[in-house]
Image: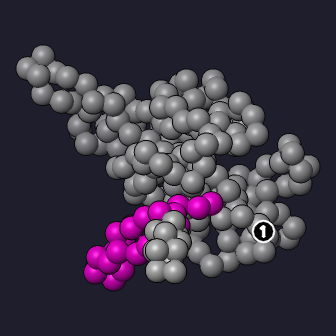
Amino acid sequence: MGLFLSRKLANILISFYWKKVKIAGVQIEEMVSLASRTGRHLQRYDKGCRQVVGCIPYRYRKNSTSDGEAAEGELEVLLISSQKGNAMMFPKGGWETDESMEEAALRETIEEAGVKGEVQKSLGHWRYKSKSQGTYHDGFMFPLLVNEQLESWPEKNFRRRNWVSASEAKDICPHGWMKEALEVLVSRETCMKVEATGA
């Protein structure tokens, strides 16, 4: 009996990971599920439009300088395959009633792409028509500066992930609203680089 309970408990704990969060300046650890949420009983709607949030995971490729030092290189973004096909897109999913918009965006990104990082200021809001359901959705996108790439994540067996340049992502991603969000991110990052260098 004890061995059975230990195995059962171990299996439950395998489906969780520890996440460090800051609340009111105090760092705490909270346990987060490694299983994707399912169902739509907590899904948010506004005037019949499903509320969808997502992230554009990004990083800067490290380049070597002539003296061997690492330097910040080209902006790369992470695309994932759709669950039921080969289309490549950014992670996104339903915003649920028990979470903030940013929490939902991070959760969807961990579930679908297996990366964690810092969710930054919103890239904007788009209304788009779902090809599979024929209904309108409100999409909210955030940039996510990636600081960790997980080896195991909830949808690992259903999705491929691929780091590409921003220009490649524009060519590959079939969703116009996601391409527009990417353009906002590229423009924002370009402006920040210019300000930082004083050029």
Q: Is residue 184 above or below residue 163?
A: below
Q: Residue at x 61, y 43 (%)?
A: 157
Return the x and y of residue 100 as percentages of the image width and height: 57, 73
Foreground residue, 29 or 179? 29
Answer few, some or many: residues within 10 Å of disc 1's Cα (few below 14, many 20 plus, some between 14 and 19): few
Q: Is residue 171 visible?
A: yes
Please, what is the three-letter code of the amino acid marked with disc 1? Arg
- In the figure, residue 87 lies in which quadrant? top right
**Residue positioned most to the left:** 67
| 160 sits to left or right of 19 | right
Return the x and y of residue 156 as percentages of the image width and height: 57, 45
**Residue positioned most to the top:** 66
Q: Main secondary structure of the magenta part?
A: strand
Q: Is residue 20 magenta?
A: yes
- In the figure, residue 20 lies in which quadrant? bottom left
| 132 sits to left or right of 85 | right
Q: Is residue 97 above or below residue 115?
A: below
Q: Residue at x 87, y 67 (%)?
A: 48
Q: Which contiguous range is marked in magenta? A: 13-36
Q: Is residue 32 above or below residue 140?
A: below
Q: Is residue 55 visible?
A: no
Q: Residue at x 57, y 29 (%)?
A: 169
- In the figure, residue 173 lies in which quadrant? top right
Residue linked to disc 1:
40
Foreground residue, 14 or 80? 14
| 128 sits to left or right of 117 | right
**Residue positioned most to the right:** 134
Return the x and y of residue 132 as percentages of the image width and height: 87, 45
Q: Is residue 166 magenta?
A: no
Asked which secondary structure carries label 1, the reply is loop
Q: Residue at x 78, y 74 (%)?
A: 41
